[in-house]
Image (spheres, coloured by chain):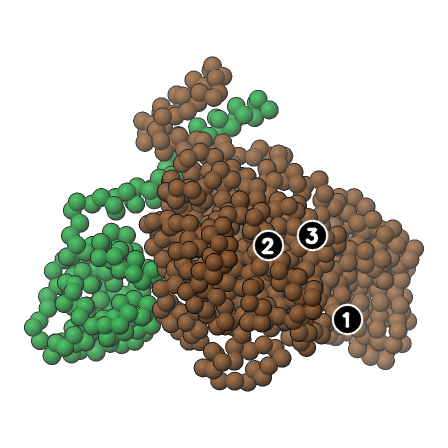
């Protein structure tokens, strides 16, 4: 019995001294915890832009019909199950007025970098407390995101 | 990291040198957890785990058994699903287990498990399992680790609120998730006539104290809401059962939105003891019903299925002092009673708090008629009058709670992916730990009984994205083991699980381990097709039915040569394993059989039906590696065309190769 306990300690201690390629579950735990910690205290986070690839999005004053049409098609397949075009909440919030509430960059970052944003963004977190369903990542391309944004503009009355 | 590793290594060496083992405590927190954790879950080769963990299989319809703290998978027990691995649901002896009023149903969705109890403590005799889809309750025998009984439930749909029990296993309950028109009513009604034509029911299934056999004592007809989970009272609340429900909006479409409208749904409190008395006095009405009752008999190693014809129904509206609704915020899910029986914890999935109700206050409110009105004829107690207090801001999406026996509760938070430990008296949060990810149920050994063993909590996670090596679109779900013996909960281990574990129950292995059956006594085998010894092996023709009485022992079959089977014959292979030792099952498989193998335990007889598709030679063999000559454990059966004159013969070791042939010799 004593010998086996000794072996156990050796195993336990040694496993920590292994290199990275021999990853243990505990290393993974540490990583995940670190990420959570980062998310809770990130002084450089810009709540108007969100987090993701988009910083400045060029928006013309007039509606780009081609983009809006492409965006509507994406909406029908990937968004309409949870978002109404009115201001009524279904699973997620209704889209009416969303382009006035959020910047283009925030919306496009949110729909392309959903998990990170839900973990970090105060507005996204507040919305989660209301909806209690994390918006799934629907794997929109950058162009898809831009087109959906244009469709949102159309829905908000931009001509 | 590198520095720490060096430090650790040094410490390890130092420990070795001085053999002062207990001082081997690295100072870095993360590493300390890892070193400690490995030690706590390591069960050395050849050593036993301290706990059995029985884990529901969800959509695989089975139950898996793990050892804790190691997380090693010990066994998968088929309950509601066919299991080609051992022939469950394929053999003639086990097919009746899956019979229902809808015919043979080879699958179900198995959510919850409950170990039988005596005086509110786990007694290690049986474990009950619910079938969600085609409503059924099963009882698994913990001496054989086999499904012993399955009882179908009439007037039910979506048997979710089940199979929770009373403190002495007097009853197993089953509340319906889906309201439907009752079986005997006209079911061909418009769906939007829900509020008029649909009903919910709660079945009280009586369990025989000695045999464990189940029968529906009575069904309580209740308003058409969705019953979700339930728990029996304890101690002072022994006579009561508590059921959470949602969809008090009584919506029949887009429940995601339409059943989330009201600020409060209900917990239904049912005085089952009084209900039992009313029924004994002749209340209730016997109604025609059709439901299967399937029992496996270990003497005959066979199941029988009986179709029951009526059920006693009691309407909650007729008996005024049986049922009470307690308002509970936002679509309650978990409904958990603490070890003292005083606190009932409701978990509103969409609520930002956890309400804790007091049984003492509920009793008082009922006595004082402190009601805010009634819902479909059932009095609704004033929320504040039943409430002990609320746990504020516990996290997002509280689902389930269990108890550590030291006055604390631990609740899973589905949306915020964490478990939260809080004190029952103070309602203050003591600790929270992340889980990976989206936990559903959690379980402390005995954590829903009077006597929890507060050593571990096991959390069952729905999502494991990024936790294990990827395996395509579908990923394993996971169990996570936490040490809860201190104030802080410490993650020790996570391990992938099979199917979709919803709930599991763990119990000290010492309660079960000694009672495990090792083999079946061949002399007590009462299967009508048993072959007690090779001398009795035979093949019998009766019209086009052939019964093959075949034996297995390391490592041959008797008979292993059979001729005279004809096309159009139905061949029943009755396979008896003659071994009388532990851990020597034999398998039986025959080419082209469109069913499965048989896995026959020592002393057991199992039968597979086979109708050959074309004439020819069919080999059969043992599938479970049994000895050095396992590979030689094989035989042949010859199938001739219909009307053939080949006589029926069978033998082992006699039908030698034709003397005109000789085996080739090695030419030098």
Subunit that carries the residue with mark 2 = B
Secondary structure at badge 1 equals strand
On the image, the x and y values in percent for residue B599 come to: 72, 56
Q: From the viewer's perspective, is the residue at label 2 or at label 1 nearer? A: 2
- Gap between marks 3 and 1, in whole Å? 42 Å
Secondary structure at badge 2 equals loop
- What color was chain A assigned in the picture? green
Q: From the viewer's perspective, is the residue at label 3 or at label 1 nearer? A: 3
Query: If you read the primary sequence from the N terminus, does the residue marked by circle 2 or circle 3 appear first?
Result: 3
Subunit that carries the residue with mark 3 = B
Q: Is residue B539 left or right of residue A116?
A: right
Rate crowding at label 3 as few (under 14), some (14 to 19) or many (20 or more) other CA atoms within 10 Å.
some
Rate crowding at label 1 as few (under 14), some (14 to 19) or many (20 or more) other CA atoms within 10 Å.
some
Q: Would you name the residue on which mark 3 appears?
A: B141
Q: Would you name the residue on which mark 2 appears?
A: B239
Nearer-the-camera pick, B423 or B506: B423
**Which chain gets the brown colouring?**
B
> For the view shown, which residue lies furthest in the left direction?
A61
Q: Would you name the residue on which mark 1 appears?
A: B616
């Amino acid at each position: 019995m004593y010998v086996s306990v000794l072996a156990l300690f050796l195993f336990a201690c040694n496993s920590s001294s292994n290199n990275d390629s021999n990853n243990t579950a505990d290393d993974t735990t540490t990583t995940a915890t670190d990420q959570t910690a980062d998310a809770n205290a990130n002084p450089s986070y810009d709540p108007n832009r969100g987090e993701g690839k988009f910083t400045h999005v060029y928006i013309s004053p007039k509606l780009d019909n081609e983009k809006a049409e492409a965006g509507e098609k994406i909406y029908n397949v990937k968004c309409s199950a949870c978002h109404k075009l009115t201001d009524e909440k279904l699973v997620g919030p209704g889209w009416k007025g969303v382009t006035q509430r959020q910047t283009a960059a925030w919306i496009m970052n949110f729909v392309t970098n959903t998990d990170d944003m839900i973990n970090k963004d105060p507005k996204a977190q507040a919305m989660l407390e209301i909806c209690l369903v994390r918006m799934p990542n629907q794997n929109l391309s950058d162009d898809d995101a831009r087109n959906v944004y244009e469709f949102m503009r159309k829905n908000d009355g931009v001509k | 990291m590198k520095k720490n590793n060096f430090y650790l290594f040094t410490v390890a060496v130092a420990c070795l040198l001085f053999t002062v083992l207990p001082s081997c405590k690295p100072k870095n927190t993360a590493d300390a957890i890892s070193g400690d954790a490995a030690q706590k879950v390591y069960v050395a080769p050849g050593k036993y785990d301290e706990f059995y963990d029985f884990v529901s299989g969800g959509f695989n319809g089975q139950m898996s058994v793990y050892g804790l703290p190691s997380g090693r998978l010990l066994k998968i027990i088929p309950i509601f699903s066919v299991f080609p691995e051992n022939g469950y649901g394929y053999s003639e002896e086990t097919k009746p287990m899956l019979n229902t009023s809808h015919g043979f149903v080879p699958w179900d969705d198995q959510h919850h498990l409950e170990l039988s109890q005596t005086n509110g403590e786990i007694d290690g005799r049986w474990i009950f399992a619910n079938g969600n889809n085609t409503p059924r309750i099963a009882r698994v025998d913990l001496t054989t680790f086999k499904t012993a009984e399955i009882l179908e439930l009439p007037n039910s749909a979506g048997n979710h609120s089940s199979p929770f029990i009373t403190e002495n296993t007097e009853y197993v309950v089953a509340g319906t998730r889906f309201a439907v028109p009752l079986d005997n009513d006209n079911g061909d009604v418009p769906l939007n006539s829900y509020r008029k034509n649909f009903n919910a029911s709660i079945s009280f299934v009586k369990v025989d104290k000695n045999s464990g056999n189940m029968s529906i004592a009575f069904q309580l007809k209740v308003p058409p809401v969705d019953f979700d989970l339930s728990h029996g009272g304890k101690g002072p609340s022994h006579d009561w059962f508590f059921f959470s429900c949602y969809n008090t909006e009584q919506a029949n479409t887009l429940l995601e939105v339409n059943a989330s409208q009201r600020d409060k749904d209900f917990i239904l409190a049912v005085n089952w003891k009084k209900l039992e008395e009313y029924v004994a006095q002749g209340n209730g009405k016997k109604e025609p019903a059709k439901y299967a009752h399937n029992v496996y008999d270990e003497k005959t190693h066979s199941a029988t299925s009986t179709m029951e014809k009526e059920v006693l129904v009691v309407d909650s509206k007729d008996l005024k002092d049986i049922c009470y609704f307690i308002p509970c915020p936002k679509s309650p899910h978990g409904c958990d009673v603490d070890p003292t029986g005083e606190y009932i914890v409701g978990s509103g999935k969409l609520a930002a708090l956890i309400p804790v109700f007091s049984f003492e206050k509920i009793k008082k409110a009922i006595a004082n008629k402190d009601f805010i009105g009634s819902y479909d004829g059932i009095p609704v107690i004033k929320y504040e009058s039943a409430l002990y207090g609320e746990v504020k801001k516990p996290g997002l999406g509280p689902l389930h709670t269990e108890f550590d026996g030291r006055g604390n509760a631990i609740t899973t938070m589905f949306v915020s992916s964490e478990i939260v430990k809080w004190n029952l008296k103070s309602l203050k949060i003591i600790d929270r730990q992340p889980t990976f990810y989206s936990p559903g149920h959690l379980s402390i050994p005995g954590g829903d009984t009077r006597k929890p063993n507060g050593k571990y909590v096991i959390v069952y996670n729905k999502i494991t994205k990024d936790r294990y090596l990827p395996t395509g679109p579908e990923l394993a779900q996971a169990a996570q083991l936490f040490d809860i013996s201190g104030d802080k909960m410490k993650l020790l281990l996570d391990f992938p699980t099979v199917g979709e574990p919803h709930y599991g129950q763990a119990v000290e292995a010492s309660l079960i381990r000694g009672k495990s059956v090792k083999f079946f006594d061949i002399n007590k085998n009462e299967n009508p097709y048993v072959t007690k010894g090779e001398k009795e092996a035979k093949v019998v023709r009766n019209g086009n039915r052939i019964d093959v009485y075949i034996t297995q022992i390391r490592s041959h079959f008797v008979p292993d040569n059979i001729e005279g089977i004809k096309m159009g014959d139905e061949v029943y292979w009755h396979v008896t394993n003659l071994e009388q030792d532990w851990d020597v099952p034999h398998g039986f498989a025959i080419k082209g059989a469109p069913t499965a193998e048989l896995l026959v335990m020592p002393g057991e007889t199992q039968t597979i039906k086979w109708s050959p598709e074309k004439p020819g030679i069919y080999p059969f063999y043992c599938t479970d590696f049994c000895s050095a000559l396992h590979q030689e454990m094989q035989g042949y059966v010859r199938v001739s065309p219909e009307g053939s004159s080949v006589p029926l013969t069978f033998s082992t070791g006699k039908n030698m190769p034709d003397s005109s042939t000789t085996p080739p010799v090695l030419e030098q």
